[in-house]
Image (cartoon, rainbow, N blue to C red):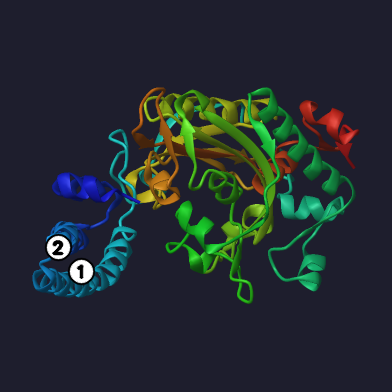
Amino acid sequence: MLTISLIREKKDFISERLKVKNFDAKEILDKIISLDTERRDIQTRADQMQGEMNRISKEIGSLMKEGKKNEAEAAKEKTYKLKEEIKALSDKLIPLDNELKNEIVKLPNLPNESVAPGHGADDNVKVREGGKIPVLPETALPHWDLIKKYDIIDFDLGIKLTGAGFPVYKGKGAKLERALINFFLDEGGKAGYREVMPPIMVNEDSGFGTGQLPDKEGQMYHVGIDNFYLIPTAEVPITNIYRDVILSADELPIKNVGYTPCFRREAGSWGAHVRGLNRLHQFDKVEIVQIAHPDHSYESLGEMVSHVEGLIAKLGLPYRIMRLCGGDMSFTSALTYDFEVWSGAQKRWLEVSSTSNFESFQSNRLKCRYKEKGDKQTRLVHTLNGSALALPRIVAAILENNQTENGIKVPEVLVPYTGFEFID
């Protein structure tokens, strides 16, 4: 959420920057400025009346001591009237504050100056690529056929138990999934991230804090009776650990890593590109989250990008890193790098990670601040997160790229976790 002070001071700048995200903010910004002006005017009048009431209240005691009872009673009447007027003004402030907040949360985060304009994936900028694209025979199978051949993931059973998009992992498929989770968590630990295991349901405050609400409620599973939401990513609970917290500057950056199942309705998704593991309603993901000093948050982002790149390289998967254009970025992001791995049998790139800096957009919602040593003033931190990694498409790429006549070869770094070298 953008701060009201920034909106007041740089309305035109904000309007121009949001055009990079193809967002026309003029009408909303004009309304915000109008509401804020009205609110500030009412608040000024209320403060002036409160000051006058405090002054008169002090005079009453002096008048009583001097025996000026009638004047004291008249002064009391003035305070009663002022109190009523202050309450009337305060009653006007409540709906104004709510309306102002409802307008501000409609504004997406400002894109970083390095973000290029564009409308979608075709306008994203390739930063670099790595690994070697495998040359597979014409008879190579896509992962949805491989999982049937080796009986490692059962989509039909998932439909029976729950519905489409909720697969059941079996045998070596389940062990491969668990191996990847443990590998990603261990690598996060080696990189200085503290492991946490958060709840997989959150309340409305948590959803608002990281920007899922009110923007993405249609994509989240809602438990109506308790008003909880199943998390779409571990980013939500892990980042919200620091909601309403004031940190000291020497604690930053704070680095956490966590595994959770993730739940997304994915309403409106269909077609060949969502077949098999390409698009699920429930999937496993390991997330890295940093709470960073504003002066160093882009250093943190670079570190996170390198960490994710290292994971993919260790798995032996060909990959490319894309800097997202304005039109392909999320509502909350200031700068995002997407990681894509090559799917050998599908012959297409699959997104497996988004690594983003949100600057102070989330922290303003979270009220997460920090203090420099010896400074009483608090400032907003910067928040960052990244998938490290989302498992379904990683599994799809491993299965397709590593298929051989003898079975599917398990990446060498995972063998100590799986206990086997081939899925056969």
**Image coords of residue 48 (percent x, y):** 13, 58
Residue farthest front in this picture: 67
> Quarter of the image holding residue 222?
bottom right
**Image coords of residue 241 (percent x, y):** 57, 45
**Disc 1 residue type?**
Ile
Nearest the viewer among 217 and 416 is: 217
**Left or right relative to 20: residue 170:** right
> Quarter of the image holding residue 258?
top right
**Image coords of residue 281 (percent x, y):** 65, 62
Is the residue marked by circle 1 packed among few (<14), some (14-19), or many (20+) residues within 10 Å?
many
Q: Residue at x 77, y 54 (%)?
A: 145
**Label 1 with label 2: CB-CB less than 8 Å:** yes
Name the quarter where the C terminus is drawn: top right
**Left or right relative to 93: residue 414:** right
Q: Residue at x 61, y 35 (%)?
A: 256
Whether 265 is drawn above or below 369: the answer is: below
Using the rendered image of the protein, determine whether residue 132 is visible from the camera's viewpoint: yes
